[in-house]
Image: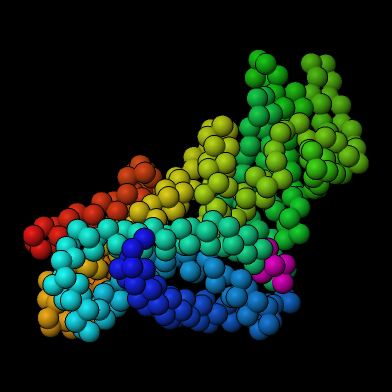
Amino acid sequence: MQRIDWYILRVISTWFFIILIILVSFRAIGFLVRETGDIGLGDYQLIHVLFVTLMRVPGFIYEIFPAAVLFGGLMGLGGLARNQELMAMRAAGVSIGRLVKSLVKVGLILAVGGVLVGETVAPALEQESEVKRAEWLNEQTILHSKNGVWIRDAKTYVNIRRINPDRKISDIAVYTFADDGVLKMMQSATGAKYDGKQWILQNVSELELGEKRNTLEQFSHRKLGLDLKMGLLLNLGIDPAFLSMTELYNYISFLHDNEQRSPEYEVVFWSKMVVPVLSVLLLLLSLPFVIKDVRNADMGKHLMAGSITGVLFFLVSKTSGFAGVVYDVSPLLVAWIPVLLIAGATAWLYRRLV
């Protein structure tokens, strides 16, 4: 990177972190206020609320990352314009194309940092905070519906109703069918534990259905005839926003293998995939607001333009996400609609500059 690239990176990064701290603080305060309503339930106290809020901060960073990039770009470039530095660059022969190249480099560097936080630190802390919160509230994490989740493996169907705060599963029913589709065995278990390789059912009541008579037996332990990894199963009770892209991909593949729908998880997966692209585009979007009136740069005008753009982007992304799940629209299309809109707006603004 040349000196101009490093200078633009330093200016925009400074404003990016300032804006990020402000936005994350507001987001955390809102979450904190909401959580205080549960103080007194179970063992949930103020110190627990503060702990959970603190563990959610990396997730908040990733959630508002694109908006922080946009505001950082507007404020950073606006400051360069106000101090006549942008005009000096233009007078020295720095073209708009050269500035775009610098912004792309800056955007990629910031995007890499955001992805590292959002895909490594945030998911682990958010999942742990959710488990701790449920434990302090003395709650159980219910799976996808009141009837739990159904898992199929060949001729075996498993119904798991609950994931406990200590990450153990309970209230389990197993149905095994013969090749001709006739039910041949039913099992019910109070719980199950993972021994590192497989799940072991506990306190099992097993009913075997025969042609002439049925046999009912009780067992303290029985192997669960289902190849289901610990991490994949625990993800069943967790909000998809709390999962990394790798975990989401594995879980979506698992749902498809078991012929279950996964639109909510696919929307979140593709939305996370487009964050780096979206961050770069939003940074590029900030330049036209500043460059066309470089002699009379108005910081308030830039901030207002960024605010309107940010609000519109938020509304479109949320609306498209809900619509995608409700109306069964392609998750890939839902995730890319905001990106395409931002790309179109950016191309139109740059065309006006030429």
Q: Does the magenta portion include 134?
A: yes
Q: Residue at x 63, y 80 (%)?
A: 50
Q: Residue at x 15, y 66 (%)?
A: 93
Residue 329, position as x, y percentages in the image: 34, 44
The answer to which of 300 and 334 lies nearer the viewer is 300
Q: How is the image coloured?
A: rainbow
Q: Residue at x 23, y 54 (%)?
A: 343
Magenta part of the protein: which range?
A: 131-136
- Residue 16 visible to the viewer: no
From the viewer's perspective, is residue 182 above or below residue 290? above
- Residue 226 visible to the viewer: yes
From the viewer's perspective, is residue 212 above or below residue 312? above
From the viewer's perspective, is residue 152 above or below residue 54? above
Q: Is residue 344 left or right of residue 241?
A: left
Q: Is residue 260 left or right of residue 17?
A: right
Quadrant containing the C terminus in the rendered view = bottom left
Residue 332, position as x, y percentages in the image: 36, 44
Q: Does the magenta portion include 34?
A: no
Q: Residue at x 65, y 19 (%)?
A: 181
Q: Is residue 66 left or right of residue 269?
A: left
